[in-house]
Amino acid sequence: MSSFSVRTGGQAGSALLNICDDDLLGRRITDGKRTMEIGGYYRERLVGREEAARLLSESQIINMVGERTVSLALELEVGVEDGVRRIGGVPFLLVFKM
């Protein structure tokens, strides 16, 4: 079973979600110019695919990292492929729903 690491919260009345592939926790990714530490910012609890899909659908501000996470978001039409960026080959996507 694939797991996702999530942290939820609120910012200015909006549901905030930080979510990543659980196997990225503790990693540092870099492409020479940019570096991303994948740590506590994403670590609150682990959830399965069904819960991750619900959180992605319901949240208004989403910060996501990882192949599984970004693929799930695109499958759910939460964000678009053109918005995906990569650092060290790892995709990340930021979504602000209006």
Image (cartoon, rainbow, N blue to C red):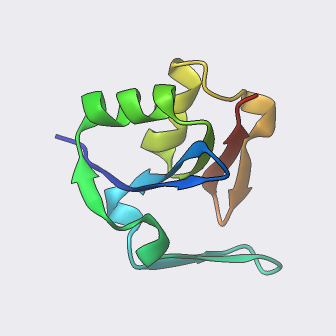
x and y percentages locating residue 42 in the rendered image: 44, 65
Which residue sits at x=24%, y=54%?
A: 46
Which residue sits at x=49%, y=25%?
A: 57
Quadrant the C terminus occupies: top right
Relative to 17, is 46 on the left or the right? left
Q: Quadrant of residue 68?
A: top left
Relative to 34, is 61 on the left or the right? left
Quadrant the N terminus occupies: top left
Name the residue at the left extreme.
Answer: 1
Above-or-below relation of 3 to 90 = above
Above-or-below relation of 68 to 19 = above
x and y percentages locating residue 33 in the rendered image: 83, 79
| Between 23 and 14, the one nearer to me in the picture | 14
Q: Quadrant of residue 81?
A: top right
x and y percentages locating residue 60 in the rendered image: 61, 36
Relative to 81, is 65 on the left or the right? left
x and y percentages locating residue 58 in the rendered image: 48, 28
Q: Quadrant of residue 83?
A: top right
Which residue sits at x=45%, y=54%?
A: 20
Number of callouts in the render?
Answer: 0
Which residue sits at x=64%, y=52%?
A: 92
| Between 7 and 31, the one nearer to me in the picture | 7
Above-or-below relation of 43 to 12 = below
